[in-house]
Image: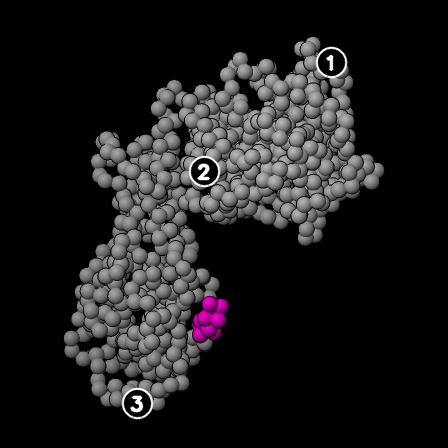
Amino acid sequence: MYIIGCVFQDHAYPADELMPLTCRGRVRGQEPSRGDVDDALGKFSLTLIDTLDTLVLLNKTTEFEEAVRRVLRDVRLDNDIVVSVFETNIRVLGGLLGGHSMAVMLKDTGYHMQWYQDELLHMAKDVGLRLLPAFNTSSGLPYPRVSPQTIHKATAVGICPDHTHSCLHTHTATVFRSLVHARRALDFLWEKRQRNSNLVGTTINIHSGEWVRRDSGVGAGIDSYYEYLLKAYILLGDDLFLQRFNIHYASIMKYISQPPLLLDVHIHKPLLPARTWMDSLLAFFPGLQVLKGDIRPAIETHEMLYQVTKKHNFLPEAFTTDFRVHWAQHPLRPEFAESTYFLYKATKDPYYLEVGRTVLDNLNRFARVPCGFAAMKDVRTGSHEDRMDSFFLAEMFKYLFLLFAEEEDLTFNVEDYIFTTEAHLLPLSLSTAPHAPSPANTTSEEELDDSNFDWTCPNTRLLFPDPAFPRNLRDPIRSAVDKSCPRPAIHREPGMGRPPLRAQDFMANNPDHLELLRRMGVSLIHLKDGRVQLVQHATQAVSAVAAEDGMRFMQEMMELSSQQQKEQLPPRAVQIVSHPFFGRVVLTSGPAQFGTDLSKSITGVRGFVTVAEPYSGCAELSNAAFVQGRIALLQRGQCMFAEKARHIMKAGAIGGIVIDDNEGSSSDTAPLFQMAGDGRNTDDVTLPLLFLFYKEGNILLEALKEYREVEVLLSDKARDRGRDVQEEEEDCSTDQTSPVPAATLDQSHVRTVEQDESAPHNEEVTPEEDVGPAIKRNPEPEEEPEVDKDSSRKSVEAMMADWREDLEAFQQMEDEL
């Protein structure tokens, strides 16, 4: 790090940052704009200020003294430039305070900095005063940007589009020292939390106090808020900060934490995920959990992050829940190294030294360039970006040095200091200094329940006496991220002798499968759109072996899902071509990712429809003679789509239509549904299989109920409705002269689910009771019942109105594709 600091002095000073690929300094306005990233640059010699206390930590006291003199001599704070309130606070004001605390400590030893008269502290105060105009809002929440040219001319500005929105961490960044203004902003945010979930969003209107972004997590835009609450309590001794942190933390662990994942949720509907990926800034959270004293989830989340790091060499800026790259950049962020250091301090487990070695080796192998360390533009390709943020030297190297440092390597006791969010060192002795009284306490007695102070540092209940315990937590997570997933021979506990459930065999309505999931710590949620969401909590498994099985099952599920996420297929058409429809009715249908590709068929597949028995199609058909040469109608559920296709194909069907059992579903409101395979080779399926939502499927079933025979065309798009209509009518009149067995639909056997898919199908049903014959065919012709022509005409007219809507929707989807 010291060598890199020398490179900065030689090639970049007095610029804010070093550009390691071109070996020059980055001066704002002289390089192409990078957007919001450049708001951290205020022509403050940012990297120099940000790394002052790092020099002392490395025992480079002579260099530190020279750096302080340079800051006092060269740095100007009245530059006419708009800067980020948050970044200026944590890097410049925080760097000056950290440098001041080190200067005072060295001066007290009697050997260094004897000339120092709190100059850095005065500069920090000056920076704080220049930031204060940002707080001049009706709510007390600061604008995210400010122009600090002079105290009198300082103006605050918002961010686009309307200068009224700001990320949450901006509002609390000055909580440590600008107590009056920051405390007012912090109180306002607390009052604006969602009272049922006790969560806060990430972006808020600073004038109205309305949440602009209602997603909540622990990553970008919100991370520092939680960190400041806990550290403000430690540093300032105000119990109210701890109380608020504990209330938030309980909600985070209830809604956001899905060990080992940390997934954003909606503050008003905290059981509803807000996204399916995570950003790298949440890597700080295991370290905060260590400070809180909650070690177990910290170990789990950190291990997941470590495996993702090993998979991609660095932690991508964002990655999906199946650990693929979502955003490929990596600007050399320090949060993962920070959590690694704190976990090692808490556990003294040498495993975390191994983790730190991996981080260090990857930095040297992939990021090191002749003039420093370059950010990764894409972790997949290893390409670089001409960027080395100041936090790389201020935080990354600080935490890595502390991780490997022996006691004799440190010239002062780090335990006497607290790390700010930028890893600057502030003395804990501040907590003994007198403070201004807190604002009047308006918190209710219920909120101040002492039980909320449980599990707060120091907490020894989760520091494990069994050295194998952390390994038992880590191993399943390692297997989940590692796609190869080797399965060693292991001894199974009594009651776990059966082989683990495989993803390709899983059925959501099988009670035995649900019990196996429960034992493995996997919970299942049925979503209203018919999809199933699986979440694993390894700590809820009945044993470590079961937890490993659960992790492996989840990985198989993710691999199966990944295989099924092929290129988006366009919608297909189910066109009713028989009398009296003659092709004028087209139902929008979803394709299958297996079987006949209708887009390669000129004519499509045409045939009469019949309901399979059993209706689920999950067993060999009992009405195979009627299905042969026809298109089988099937109900969704109870088995995989490919299994249904195989059963009707064995019965001689020429195609199949699966009808959704989720009552009320419609292509009008639901996204296009594609039927996936079962994870096995589906080349043996050679007929087309289409999917109809409940509304469209019911139209087809009603038509079948009302008319003797219904013929449909399965194709990639609707055929010309006006062609061969006369021929169809002639065919129809001919058919009418030839009596055929009447086909009536027994509605008691076309069973729809009365509740929505949020509840699993836990009922035990038998084929005789639940999926009996949907179409009853008598061996002998029976007299055709009389039909009320008026009611029939009204029924047809109502269906035609629906069909016209479906036709318009289908045409719109065709145009979009």
Q: Is residue 813 magenta?
A: yes
Q: Quadrant of residue 230?
A: top right
Residue at x 66%, y 48% (from the top left corner): 32
Label 1 close to label 2 by CB (< 8 Å): no
Q: Is residue 230 magenta?
A: no
**In this picture, is 69 found above or below 588?**
above
Expressed as whole percent of the image width and height from the top left, the position of residue 266 reads 53, 46
Work out whether mark 1 precedes mark 2 in sequence or the reverse, and give the earlier one. 1
Q: Secondary structure at mark 1?
A: loop
Give, as a three-letter code, the residue at label 1.
Gln
Q: Give, as a single range, the part of the protein colored magenta.
A: 806-817
Q: Quadrant of the N terminus?
A: top right
Q: CA distance from mark 1 to mark 3?
A: 109 Å
Which residue is the site of mark 1? 114
Which residue is the site of mark 3? 730
Which residue is the site of mark 2? 313
Q: Image check: 197 left or right of 35?
A: left
Count neighbours of disc 1 (C-alpha within 10 A) and say few if under 14, some if 14 to 19, many if 20 or more: few
Residue at x 32%, y 67% (from the top left corner): 597
Residue at x 59%, y 14% (from the top left corner): 411
Work out whether mark 3 precedes mark 2 in sequence or the reverse, and give the earlier one. 2
Q: CA distance from mark 1 to mark 2?
A: 45 Å
**In this picture, is 749 found above or below 279?**
below
Residue at x 70%, y 17% (from the top left corner): 104
Work out whether mark 1 precedes mark 3 in sequence or the reverse, and give the earlier one. 1
**In this picture, is 519 found above or below 760?**
above
Q: Image check: 140 left or right of 511?
A: right
